[in-house]
């Protein structure tokens, strides 16, 4: 086909031009919106930082409750979060357990039940956990207490991500 036989009408030229400009403008508007919406998902899965909680010398073989705070960023909102953990020494290892009952999320306490002073007790539905956080058969919780990643460095105990046990 020669150039003379392939002519573009004014209408076709205007259609091609407006389609190209419109597509360019739409992409220019949608790209920032897509980046804004996907940014939190792209940052998900980053490693959690360890937070200092207590000194190693403060710990005993009996679980003690320690509170700690850290800055948390949820998408574009930054806030200070306070959490608690039962921390104790078992053998030569430091163990940190979540105080949240795995049945319905109530807060457990250690040694508060007169009948079972060496267990974690949940007052909401009478759930019980052994000292190591394992759920007692025949009570409502179906899995053990969650456990924190623990790092001991320079005499300080640091807690990281919380992990679900099965």
Image (cartoon, grey):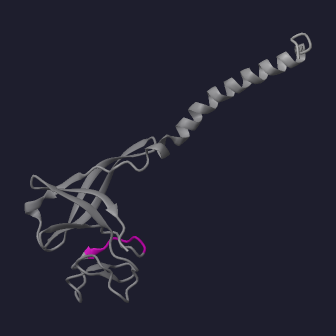
Residue at the left extreme of this rendering: 57
Q: Is residue 125 above or below residue 29?
A: below
| For residue 35, side relative to residue 128 (left or right) | right
Residue 7 coordinates in the image, percent (x, y): 89, 13
Q: Is residue 17 above or below residue 76?
A: above
85 vs 44, nearest the viewer: 44
Residue 141 coordinates in the image, percent (x, y): 39, 80
Residue at the right extreme of this rendering: 5
Residue 88 coordinates in the image, percent (x, y): 17, 69
Q: Magenta residues, as a range? A: 104-109
Displayed quadrant of residue 145: bottom left
Residue 60 coordinates in the image, percent (x, y): 11, 70
8 vs 62, nearest the viewer: 8
Count the marks: how many? 0
| For residue 132, side relative to residue 28 (left or right) | left
Magenta stretch holds residue 10: no
Q: What residue do we see at 34% from left, 76% from top?
A: 144
State the predominant SS element of the stretch in magenta: loop
């Amino acid at each position: 086909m020669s150039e003379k036989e392939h002519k573009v009408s004014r209408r076709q030229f205007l259609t091609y031009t407006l389609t190209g400009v419109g597509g360019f403008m739409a992409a220019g508007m949608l790209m920032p919106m897509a980046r804004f919406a996907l940014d939190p998902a792209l940052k998900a899965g980053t490693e959690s930082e360890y937070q200092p909680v207590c000194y190693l010398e403060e710990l005993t073989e009996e679980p003690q409750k320690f509170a700690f705070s850290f800055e948390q960023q949820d998408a574009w909102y930054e806030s200070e979060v306070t959490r608690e953990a039962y921390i104790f020494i078992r053998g030569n290892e430091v163990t940190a357990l979540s105080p949240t009952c795995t049945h319905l999320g109530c807060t457990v306490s250690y040694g508060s039940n007169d009948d079972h002073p060496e267990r974690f007790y949940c007052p909401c539905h009478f759930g019980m956990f052994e000292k190591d956080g394992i759920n007692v058969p025949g009570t409502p919780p179906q899995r053990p207490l969650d456990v924190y990643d623990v790092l001991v460095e320079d005499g300080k105990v640091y807690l990281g991500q919380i992990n679900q046990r099965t």
